[in-house]
Structures are given as structure tokens and as C-alpha cells.
Image (cartoon, rainbow, N blue to C red):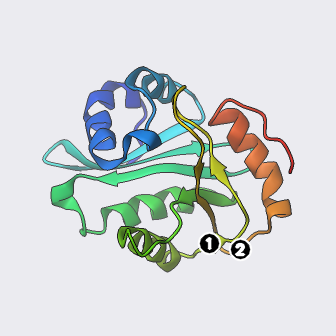
Amino acid sequence: MLLKNPQTRFEEIYQIYKESFPNIERRTKDDQKRVFGNPCYKIRVIEEEEKIVAFLGYWDLNSCIFMEHLATTEICRGKGYGKKLVQEAMEETEKPVFLEIEPITEENPITRSRAVFYERMGFHSNSFYYEQLPLKPLDKPIQLWVMSHGKPVTEEEFLPYKKEIYEIVYGVEAFEK
């Protein structure tokens, strides 16, 4: 379900966000509140007994959809809620869809599970270098993988989308390498 006024459920969603993402992958609470007020930012949720148990936060940009955060409460993981939220968002767009994931590592088995989850829904990992820009002043960029729905893209094909993502989502200009 797409929330028409996500600010009214901010505290509930923020709690799941805080529990699901490491500090380096989160904005400050005040900054995340500001994001909720951006007309490009959309929130889809699943509720159980009138309580939000899963959410997808994504950006409906001019050129693409950028899925930023997908999270489920610990007790509700494995119920297909994440898949349902992603599919709902993709059914309502003709635009290219992108997201970021951590590179797969042996040290962190969840990275493989996350990649497989998205691959089952038709996403492809792209092999070019990409950084998630810092979400807080003292954070450093994080090297991530860009996944694209439907087909892989080259770094050159991704560049116009990257520029818009960097500008709108991260508030900076993207520079070509």
C-alpha cells in the first residue's frame, strides 16, 4: 500500500529503518524526516493488525525509480513482504528501476542472499565502480553495486541516472570519471 501522507507514520517506519540498516547506511532522524517531505520520495508499507511491519522507501525521479530502503521487522522476515512491496512499485512504472546493494562477500553471507533475492525479481548486478555518497557529514562513501531491473546496464548507460540520483537523493553533482 502506498502511503499518501508518510509523515504521519514516520516514527513507526523510522524504528524499522533504524533496526534494519547500519548507521553508515542511515540518515540522521531529522534528515530522514526531511526526505519524507520530498514529493519524489514514496513509501509503500505492509501492515499487520494496523502496525507497519515492512516498508519500501523509493524515489520516483524524472528518469527512473531508485529503490533506497527495503526493510521488514525481524519477526516478519521470510513472509514475502519485501517481494510484494518491490513488485507493487514496479507494476506502477514504465521507468528503469535501480537499487544499490553491498558487494557479495564470504565474510557476510547475507550479501549473497540479498543479491539472489533481487535477481529472482529480475534485477541484474552491474560490474562498474559505484559509490553510495555519505548520508551524514562524518560518513565516508561506501562502495556498492548498482542493480538494474530487466537488463544489465553499462556505466555509460547508467551515467544520466546516476547524475539524477546523486543530485536528488544525495544532494550533490555527479562528476564523470
In this view, 102 is above or below 113: above
Q: Residue at x 43, y 34 (%)?
A: 4
In this view, 126 is above or below 129: below
Viewer-proximal residue among 175 and 85: 175
Which residue bears the numbered disc 2?
Answer: 152
The tag on residue 157 is: none
In this view, 170 is above or below 100: above
Q: Could you say where residue 132 lies in the image, as x and y percent from the top left?
A: 60, 47
Viewer-proximal residue among 154 and 141: 141
Q: Amino acid at mark 1?
A: Ser
Q: Amino acid at mark 2?
A: Pro
Alpha carbon distance from label 2 to label 1: 7 Å
Which residue bears the numbered disc 1?
Answer: 125
Q: Secondary structure at mark 1?
A: strand
Q: Could you say where residue 140 lies in the image, as x and y percent from the top left?
A: 57, 39
The first of marks 2 and 1 along the sequence is: 1
Taking the image as shown, residue 151 lies to the left or right of residue 7, namely: right
Q: Residue at x 70, y 75 (%)?
A: 151
Q: Secondary structure at mark 2?
A: loop
Q: Residue at x 25, y 34 (%)?
A: 12
Which image quadrant is residue 150 in? bottom right
Taking the image as shown, residue 7 lies to the left or right of residue 119, namely: left
Determine whether label 2 and label 1 are within 8 Å by CB. yes
Residue at the extreme front of the image, as rendered: 107
Taking the image as shown, residue 123 lies to the left or right of residue 86, namely: right
Taking the image as shown, residue 103 lies to the left or right of residue 170, namely: left
Viewer-proximal residue among 108 and 127: 108
Q: Could you say where residue 115 lies in the image, as x and y percent from the top left?
A: 48, 72
How busy is the neighbourhood of tag 1: few (under 14 within 10 Å), some, or many (20 plus)?
A: many
* Count of numbered marks: 2
Q: Could you say where residue 99 lies in the image, as x and y percent from the top left?
A: 57, 57
